[in-house]
Amino acid sequence: MKPKVAFFDFAGCEGDQLQIANLEEELLTLLGQVEVVSFREVMKEHSDNYDIAFIEGSCTRLQDEDRLKQIRKNAKIVVAIGSCATIGGINSLKNYQDLDEVRKTVYGDKAYLFDTYAARPIDAVIPVDAYVHGCPIDKEEFLSVVKSLLLGKKPDIPNYPVCVECKKNENVCAFERGQFCVGPVTRAGCNSCCVNEGTICWGCRGLVDNPNENSQKEVLIKYGLTVDEAINKFRLYFGWQERKR
Ligand code: SF4
Ligand code: SF4
Ligand code: SF4
C-alpha cells in the first residue's frame, strides 16, 4: 500500500506547491512511491483519507485553526512547507501594523467581512513533524525530506548559519560590499544561493535554533551599522520568531 499524501494551502502565494508541481520527471518518480489524494494545484479530486499532509501558508485567521486541527487529526505526519508555514514568513510583516488598518488597506469598505489576526506558522497551532524551509522551497530539498519520511527517518535539516555555506562558496561577504545580510543567524540549507548571485540573505529559511545574536551585533558594530538599520531586514521573515523570543 502506497502512503496517501495530501497538500493544503493557507495564507500564501502557492509558490511552494508550484515548485512541487514543476518537479516534472522527478514528480513522476515520486508518484510511483505515494498516492496523491488531494492537491488543488494540479487535480480536482479530494479525499480526507491521507497519511502525510503537506501544508503551505500561514495561519492568519482564527477560523483557520479548526481546519488545521482537522488535518492534524487525519494525518499521521504533518509537514510544513515554505516560510509562511514554517516560520510565519512574509505574512508576519502585518504583525507590526495595526490589523484594522491592514484589513482596510486590502479590503477597503468590505474590511468588516474579513476577520484576521497576527500571522503565525503552522506549529503555533498544531504539532508539526517535519519542515521544508525557504521562500519558495527548494525542489531537491523537498524530495530529500519526502524520501526520509518514506524511509521512516527524521529529515536532516541544517542547524548552522548560511554564512557557513557562503564561506565555502568563497563569496565576498555582503558586509564587505556595504550591504546588510541576515546570513549570520539564518538556517543554512540553500547553499547561500542568494549571496552566490551577488545579493544578500534575507532570512527566508528562518532563524537557526540558537542564533548567535551577539555575533550578528558584532558584525553590525564592525561595519558601522545600527540595530535600527538591521531591524527592518530582520522583520521581512522573522516577524513571528522575533515575537516568540
Ligand atoms: S513561503 Fe514564499 S513561496 Fe511559499 S507561500 Fe509563502 S510567500 Fe509563497
Ligand atoms: S554575512 Fe551574508 S554575505 Fe557575509 S558570509 Fe554571511 S551569508 Fe555570506
Ligand atoms: S540565502 Fe537567505 S534568503 Fe536566500 S534562499 Fe538562502 S536563506 Fe533564503
Image: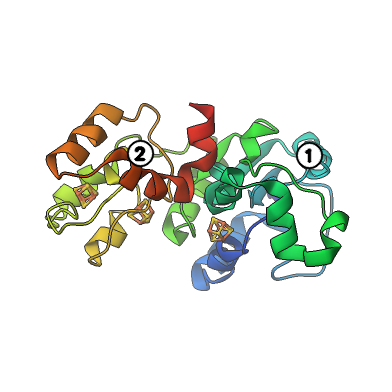
Q: How many marks?
A: 2
Callout 1, which amino acid? Answer: Glu
Q: Depth check: 160 or 225 in front?
A: 225
Q: Secondary structure at mark 2?
A: loop
| Numbered tag placed on residue 82 in the rendering | none
Q: Which residue is nearer to you in this view: 79 or 37?
A: 79
Q: Give residue 67's quadrant in the image.
A: top right
* Residue 31 horizontal side relative to residue 36, left or right: left
The residue labelled by disc 2 is 158
Q: Residue at x 60, y 62 (%)?
A: 17
Q: Quadrant of residue 214?
A: top left
Asked if the beta carbon under badge 2 is closer than 8 A to the nearest atom of ligand 3, the reply is: no
- Expressed as whole percent of the image width and height from the top left, the position of residue 118 reads 67, 41
Please, is residue 71 above or below residue 192 in the view?
Answer: above
Q: Is residue 87 visible?
A: yes
Q: Amino acid at mark 2?
A: Pro
Along the polypeptide, which appears first: circle 2 or circle 1?
A: 1
Q: Which residue is mark 1?
A: 65
Q: Residue furthest right?
A: 113
> What residue is at 64 percent from the left and 40 percent from the top?
122
The answer to whether residue 1 is visible is no
Q: Is residue 148 left or right of residue 85?
A: left
Front position in the image: 232 or 54: 232
Q: Residues within 10 Å of mark 1 (few under 14, many from 20)?
A: some
- Above-or-below relation of 214 to 5: above
